[in-house]
């Protein structure tokens, strides 16, 4: 593969991953703005995670996989605490924490070159390429964003409007 093609593919991939992370963060923000602090920590049963837990978990996952695994920051994650929490942080604190982590991660993701994407890392006991690490984080973020959306729809009984533009006969969205 030619160097220009490799660079173009790398740039396309990292840009798409970064835009998806930003899109998911925005959707979480829309959801969280509609929930009070009690709803942020509500679980209908013990084996369910509240939106607050999912936000802590996403912050931990992105920090471990991107900030540490790809960016080289120390890995100080305490994963079990993400799920054990029952309160403690307000919605504004949770969103600020997640926003800071995603902003930092997006910068790291966008900075990766084709050669860097193919480098191997050991993250959470897995041997993965940087590309795989970024892909994992984007799909993992998507999964939990969907759970937060579902919990918000259930709590508010409202359509959140994320796909309203499709019913209008056209749209200007750049990311599906």
Image: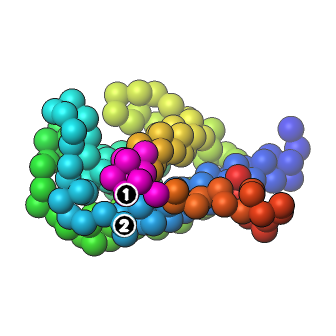
Seen at 34% across and 28% down, the residue is: 125
Q: Are marks 1 and 2 in contact (CB under 8 Å)?
A: yes
Seen at 74% across and 57% down, the residue is: 167
Q: Residue 36, how many percent across, how many down?
A: 25, 66
Q: CA distance from mark 1 to mark 2?
A: 8 Å
Q: Which callout, 1 or 2, points at the residue further toward the start of the chain? A: 2
Seen at 58% across and 61% down, the residue is: 161
Label number found at residue 34: 2
Which one is nearer the viewer's eye here, 89 or 3? 89
Quadrant holding the N terminus: top right
Callout 2: SS: loop
Which class describes the residues within 10 Å of circle 1: few (<14), some (14-19), or many (20+)?
Answer: some
Q: Residue 2, how many percent across, how many down?
A: 88, 44
Which class describes the residues within 10 Å of circle 2: few (<14), some (14-19), or many (20+)?
Answer: some
Q: Quadrant of residue 93?
A: bottom left
Q: Which residues are magenta?
A: 150-158
Residue most extreme to the front: 157
Q: Residue 102, how many percent across, how many down?
A: 44, 61
Q: Quadrant of residue 162?
A: bottom right
Which one is nearer the viewer's eye here, 87 or 161? 161
Is residue 133 visible to the viewer in this orientation of the structure? Answer: no
Q: Which residue position is annotated with label 1?
A: 156
Callout 1: SS: helix
């Amino acid at each position: 593969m030619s160097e220009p093609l490799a660079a173009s593919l790398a740039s396309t991939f990292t840009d798409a991953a970064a835009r998806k992370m930003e899109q998911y963060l925005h959707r979480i923000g829309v959801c969280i703005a509609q929930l009070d602090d009690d709803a942020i920590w509500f679980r209908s049963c013990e084996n369910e995670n509240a939106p607050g837990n999912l936000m802590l978990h996403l912050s931990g996952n992105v920090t471990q996989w991107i900030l540490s695994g790809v960016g080289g920051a120390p890995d100080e994650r305490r994963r079990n605490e993400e799920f054990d929490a029952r309160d403690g942080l307000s919605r504004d604190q949770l969103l600020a924490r997640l926003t800071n982590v995603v902003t930092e991660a997006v910068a790291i993701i966008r900075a990766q070159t084709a050669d860097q994407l193919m480098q191997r890392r050991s993250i959470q006991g897995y041997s993965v390429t940087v590309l795989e690490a970024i892909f994992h984080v984007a799909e993992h973020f998507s999964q939990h964003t969907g759970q937060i959306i579902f919990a918000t729809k259930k709590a508010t009984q409202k359509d959140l409007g994320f796909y309203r533009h499709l019913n209008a006969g056209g749209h200007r969205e750049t990311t599906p």
